[in-house]
Amino acid sequence: MSPTSDPVHRGRGPVARGSSASPELSLASVQDESTAQLQARGAAYIREYTRVKDVERTLLKSTAVVLVALRSRCTDSEGRTDWGGRSADYRRQAQELYQQANIPADSEATIQGAVRWHVGNILRDELSTEELEDYGLKALSPTARSRERRSSRAAIVSVVRAETEAAEVKKKGKAKKTASAGELAVPAGAGSLVADHLRLSKGAATIISQLSTDVIDDMTDGQRAKLDAELEAAQKALAKLRRHSRRRSAA
C-alpha cells in the first residue's frame, strides 16, 4: 500500500473490518518506517481504538433500548407492563434475539452483562421512583451504584492509609520528652497525629454514608444481623469519642 493510500498517512486510524482486513502488526512490517511515520501510525491506532470503543458503547446501549422496547410490549403476572423483564413472553423474545446474534460462547456473558447495565440505566430514566419500587427495582441506577462503590473504596483506602501512617508516627515518636523536666511530654509528630485523626474521622463518616438500604434489603437475615452488630459497635465507639470530645471542649 502506498503512503498516500495508507489510512495512517491520511491521518485516519486503520479500518476495523475484522481480523482479515486489519491483521495484527508485526515488528518486521514497520522496521523501514521513519520515527515520524511510526508516531503517526501509533496515534492513528489509538484514535481508531477510541472510536471503536465509542461505537461499541453505542451499539450495546441501542441493544438495551430494543430490549426495553420489547418489555414495554409484554405484560407481567399482574397484568402490568413488564418493565421488570420477568414474564415468560419477554424472556423468550430476549433469548431469541441473542440466539439470532450468534454471540461467541466466550463473549456471551460479558455482552449480556453490559447490555443489562444499560437496560438498568434506561429504566431509571423512564420510570419514577414509585414505579421502580412497585416493580421491586432499586431506585439507584447501575451507574450511580458504581459511582457509590468507587467513592466507598476510595474512602476505605484513605482511612487505611491514614491509620497506617498514624500508627507509624506514634511508634516512632512515642514517649519522647523535652529537655525541661517540668514540661509535659510531647510526642514527636503530634501535629501529624492530629491531622491523621481528622482524616480518619472524615473517612469513617464517608464510609458510613456509603451504606445503602437497597443493599441491606438484598442481604440474608444472617448478613443483616452481622451488619447490625458491627454498626452497634461503631455507634458505641463513636458515642465514647464524642463524649470525650465534648467534655474536653467544655473544660
Image: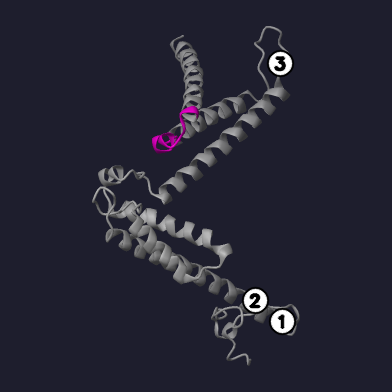
User: Which residue is depicted at the point 26% across and 46% down?
Assistant: 131
- Circle 2 SS class: helix
Q: Position of residue 245 (x, y in %)?
A: 48, 16
Disc 3 residue type (three-letter): Ala
Q: Residue at x 52, y 58 (%)?
A: 109
C-alpha span from label 2 to label 3 = 59 Å
Q: In the rendered structure, which disc, 3 or 1, sits on the residue that comes first in sequence?
A: 1
Q: Residue at x 54, y 74 (%)?
A: 48
State the residue position of label 2. 39
In the displayed orientation, state which residue is furthest to the top. 182
Q: Amino acid at mark 2?
A: Gln
In-front residue for pair 59/68: 68
Question: Helix, strand or loop at disc 1?
Answer: helix
Asked whether disc 3 touches disc 1, contact meaning CB atoms under 8 Å apart, the reply is no
Asked if the magenta segment contains residue 156, the reply would be no
**What residue did someone put label 1 on?**
30
Q: Residues within 10 Å of mark 3 (few under 14, many from 20)?
A: few
| Amino acid type assigned to the residue bearing label 1 in the image | Val
Q: Circle 3 is placed at which residue position?
A: 175
* Viewer-nearest residue: 96 or 29: 96
Comparing 241 with 137, the one in front is 137
> Over which residues does the magenta segment extend?
211-222
Q: Is residue 55 visible?
A: no
